[in-house]
């Protein structure tokens, strides 16, 4: 039994899944308690901030990579390219195309990291198709489609499950849903979950401390909102933390050091601290509308955005000491409405 367990890469699991399924398993804890304890104490799980001590070493064959997915160069020109870079100062040379999207259209899709290097892509539009890109194999596989097709929704991964949250069902007449579906990879099936307190689309999501946060977005009347909802899968309830300081939609989020950062506002970057239930301004300069945001090397980076109906190529680094955004690189082309995630890859 022990020899078999030593072959399992527990740090690649979602931390909450590890704690609920592995740490509580009496057989595992009895035969190899040191492995379970050492994993929880010393390893970095997907979605956690990696310190210099625990960040994957090159010798392990894994390192962080930023993946930029789809988007628009202009309102009439969509991009279906998926690019990858290992650099904190990306350039035309370091941003390498790796594949193209499996998409019916270039808008309204949602992406999230599934595990450590797989990316789940929920296609926007009437098809409801969902794809999984395995970066380690550079291959695509089609997953079960959602029960309710939607666009401008979000996908969040928690405890080994993917949640499709909110979205737009139809454009004319406008129909926005509060519906939430949850996907289990083992069964390859979507099931209805607890709906949002109110319908939302063009919102943002973040996963932190075993909860899913839904931030901003537009309501059923197409008005921007400032609401924040938090979902606890333990008791299947939605809670209402403090609202954002302003109403907005199409913002981007990233999680770092126990806080949620929000970009895509005109003149600032915001930070929500759940333990204090407080919002703060951490940068007094803004980023492009419909930008994307990720954590790389323990720092926050903002990719692209919309300026005057054109995609911008700048990659910005959040300097929290002087509350500014500094350009540190650029993408090969200007993009907005794209996805951006960080994975671990060999």
Image (cartoon, rainbow, N blue to C red):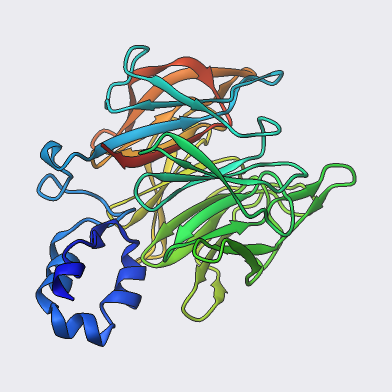
Camera-side residue of 267 and 291: 291
Quadrant assignment for the N terminus: bottom left
- Residue 131 appears in the figure: yes
Q: Is residue 246 left or right of residue 343?
A: right
Compared to 264, does 255 lie above or below?
A: below
* Residue 161 picture location, percent across and down: 49, 63
- Residue 244 appears in the figure: no
Compared to 215, does 186 lie above or below?
A: below
Residue 239 found in image quarter:
bottom right
At horizontal 19% and vertical 82% (from top left) the residue drawn is 29
Residue 298 found in image quarter:
top left
Numbered circles on residues, count: 0
Compared to 107, does 115 lie above or below?
A: below
Residue 310 found in image quarter:
top right
Compared to 251, does 163 lie above or below?
A: below
Camera-side residue of 148 and 271: 148
At horizontal 47% and vertical 36% (from top left) the residue drawn is 139
At horizontal 31% and vertical 65% (from top left) the residue drawn is 15
At horizontal 62% and vertical 40% (from top left) the residue drawn is 109
* Residue 186 picture location, percent across and down: 49, 65
Q: In this view, does 55 lie to the left or right of 236?
A: left
Camera-side residue of 103 and 107: 103
* Residue 132 picture location, percent across and down: 52, 45
* Residue 307 picture location, percent across and down: 57, 20
């Amino acid at each position: 039994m022990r020899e078999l367990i030593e072959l399992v890469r527990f740090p690649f699991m979602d931390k909450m899944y590890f704690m609920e399924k592995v740490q509580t398993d009496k057989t595992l804890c009895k035969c190899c308690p040191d492995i379970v304890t050492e994993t929880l104490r010393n390893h970095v799980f997907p979605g956690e901030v990696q310190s210099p001590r625990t960040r994957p070493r090159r010798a392990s064959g894994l390192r962080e990579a930023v993946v930029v997915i789809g988007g628009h160069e202009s309102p009439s020109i969509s991009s279906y390219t998926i690019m990858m870079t290992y650099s904190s100062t990306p350039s035309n040379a370091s941003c390498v195309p790796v594949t193209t999207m499996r998409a019916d259209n270039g808008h309204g899709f949602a992406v999230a990291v599934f595990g450590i290097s797989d990316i789940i892509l929920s296609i926007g539009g009437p098809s409801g198709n969902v794809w999984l890109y395995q970066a380690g194999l550079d291959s695509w596989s089609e997953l079960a489609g959602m029960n309710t097709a939607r666009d401008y929704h979000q996908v969040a991964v928690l405890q080994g499950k993917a949640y499709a949250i909110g979205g737009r069902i139809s454009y004319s007449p406008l129909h926005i849903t509060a519906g939430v579906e949850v996907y289990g990879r083992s069964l390859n099936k979507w099931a209805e979950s607890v709906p949002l307190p109110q319908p939302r689309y063009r919102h943002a999501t973040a996963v932190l401390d075993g909860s899913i946060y839904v931030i901003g977005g537009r309501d059923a009347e197409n008005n921007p909102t400032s609401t924040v909802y938090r979902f606890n899968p333990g008791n299947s309830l939605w809670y209402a933390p403090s609202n954002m300081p302003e109403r907005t939609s199409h913002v981007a989020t990233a999680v770092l050091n126990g806080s949620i950062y929000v970009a895509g506002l005109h003149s600032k970057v915001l930070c929500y601290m759940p333990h204090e239930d407080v919002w703060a301004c951490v940068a007094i300069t803004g980023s492009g509308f419909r930008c994307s945001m990720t954590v790389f090397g323990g720092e926050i980076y903002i990719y692209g955005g919309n300026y005057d109906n054109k995609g911008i190529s700048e990659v910005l680094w959040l300097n929290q000491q002087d509350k500014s955004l500094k350009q540190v690189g650029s993408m090969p082309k200007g993009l907005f409405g794209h996805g951006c995630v960080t994975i671990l890859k060999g």
